[in-house]
Amino acid sequence: MVTVIEAKEVIEQMPEKFSSHQFIERYILCYTWSYLQILKKYHDVEKAHRQIGVFLLKKAKEEKLCIEKTGTVLSENIFGNIDEVASWKRKNAG
């Protein structure tokens, strides 16, 4: 699963406001091997991505990632499909 250290490193590369899809895309680029292990565990891309979203929400509530959920947005996933996903804002930005 995604670690807090990995997530923090990815978040540092994100714009001030970002979607869960944008986080996942950057995570895949930065931690391809870890992402493949998540896919192997869940055997399904949607389940794996949902778990990453749950991780972000849980760790944000625990204040470990310095992000806050700002609502939801329509966002394009890695397959080009539009879904409603969480939107985030870095707390230390601006």
Image (cartoon, rainbow, N blue to C red):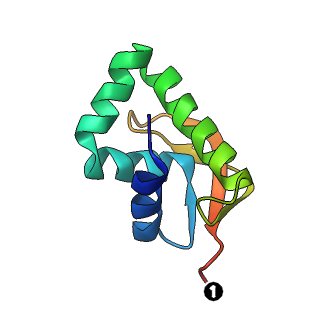
In what quadrant of the picture does the N terminus appear? Answer: top left
Residue furthest out toward the bottom: 94
Tag 1 secondary structure:
loop
Direction from residue 59 to residue 6 in the image, left or right: left
Q: Residue at x 39, y 33 (%)?
A: 79
Q: Residue at x 39, y 13 (%)?
A: 43
Query: Residue 58, located in which quarter of the rendered image?
Result: top right
In-front residue for pair 82/68? 68
Direction from residue 22 to residue 25 in the image, left or right: left
For label 1, the residue is 94
In what quadrant of the picture does the C terminus appear? Answer: bottom right
Q: Residue at x 67, y 45 (%)?
A: 57
Residue 80 point in image, percent of width and height: 42, 37
From this viewpoint, is residue 45 visible? yes
The three-letter code of the residue at mark 1 reads Gly
How many residues crowd around disc 1 within 10 Å: few (fewer than 14), some, or many (20 or more)? Answer: few
Residue 37 point in image, percent of width and height: 31, 27
In-front residue for pair 27/19? 27
From this viewpoint, is residue 71 visible? no
Q: Does residue 8 lie above or below 53 as drawn?
A: below
Q: Does residue 83 lie above or below 27 as drawn?
A: above
Residue 81 point in image, percent of width and height: 48, 34
Residue 34 point in image, percent of width and height: 30, 37
